[in-house]
Amino acid sequence: MKHKKVVLGVTGGIAIYKALEVISLLKKLEIEVQVIMTRHAREFVTPMTFEAMSGRKVLTDLFTLGADSKIEHIEVAKTADLFVVLPATANIIGKMARGIADDLLSTTLLATKAPVYVAPAMNTNMFEHVSVQENLGILRDRGVVIIEPDAGRLACGDTGKGKLAPPEDIVEQIVWALEARQTLKDKKILVTAGPTVEPIDPVRYITNPSSGRMGFEMARAARALGAEVYLVAGPVNLKTPFGVRRIDVTTSEDMYREVMGLYDRMDIVIKAAAVLDYRPEKVHEKKIKKEDIEASLTLERTRDILKTLGKTKSHQFLVGFAAQTHDVVDYAKAKIRDKNLDFMVANDVSLKGGGFQSEWNEVYLITRDMQVTHLSLDKKSVIAKEILEKIADMVK
């Protein structure tokens, strides 16, 4: 991310200290940060603190000239790759919506051609007030991206929506914007991830070791390319990727029901979940005695979600995942034919350092015409980006 410049407009809210954390995270990514502070922001934190974090002089005065006598706010507006207002108070949101330019920040916002992101932070009643919501609506209509606040306990003691989004989520949004390859914009993508769990009795169940990481990284990468992403996830302990709509399920039948309910609206379906092939024929209401388990446990096949999708698809681009321990590519090619798939991602889960429970993976990509591409061992986040970029090229 070298040579990218973010202008950070800081206003006077109690969440201002989180702007310092955002700067720290951006600097670690070698992103240049230019801070503009309003008068009220300087009542909370001194410019010197932001200068120390950003490594650059903080701009505060509308009438300051640069060293070469260029008008400061015009120069800043021209050189920005992205403009972020954080925390965004009701006051600055109102100014932006109505075109008011009465200080350095509001004036520079009018002058910039860079994409603008706004991260609101305020009391719940203020955030929900009709005038604030109308102003946010105006900004959205103009293409400004609103980084929605979280709900929770606020600094004022109230509980509700209005907390600044977590700094790591804000930085993730910034990185997406700077990469700016929106090749899946206007596409609806459904991703499944994680294992399914089938109960035997109240204390026992059948499952598999899928961590869900690959599916979650696929959802994150799809969102980064501009898609509207739905994530149907089995039981995993992973944070929802920012901007992704998550639906949690437990059993294979739960996943089938949610996937089929969304299927008709989707443009692309990526089935990365490790759905169990079998489940107990009967779920016992009481714990089975261990000496009775063998006699009591009879298995039946679960529904083949991917095959059902292949049989019923109309316009959808259908992507499957195949986890194998041998003959990986041959099995994947057979699945493409058997399940009417457009694309397959195959991996060897016995590979040391990759597969289940790992942050790393090595995969083979197989197209409908049986062309094979090998992606060598790398982080799942990197692998996911490469897969999504290939899918984007195929569906455009």
Image (cartoon, rainbow, N blue to C red):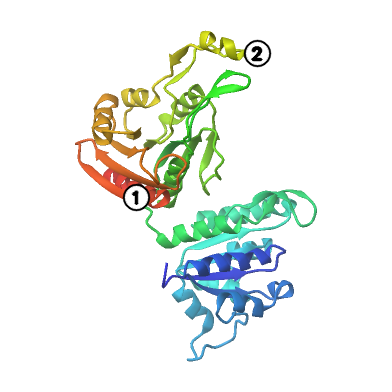
Determine which quarter of the picture holds residue 113.
bottom left
Q: Secondary structure at mark 2?
A: loop
Q: Is residue 144 visible?
A: no
Q: CA distance from mark 1 to mark 2?
A: 45 Å
Quadrant containing the N terminus is bottom left
User: What residue would you read off at disc 1?
Assistant: 377
148 and 273: which is toward the camera: 273
Q: Residue 53: where, in percent of width, then height?
A: 59, 74
Residue 14 visible to an observer of this rendering: yes
Q: Amino acid at mark 2?
A: Lys
- SS at mark 1 in the image: strand
Q: Is residue 363 left or right of residue 251?
A: left
* Residue, far right: 157
Q: Residue at x 40, y 41 (%)?
A: 355
Q: Quadrant of residue 119?
A: bottom right
Report the residue marked by disc 2: 286
Label number found at residue 63 = none
Q: Residues within 10 Å of mark 2 (few under 14, many from 20)?
A: few
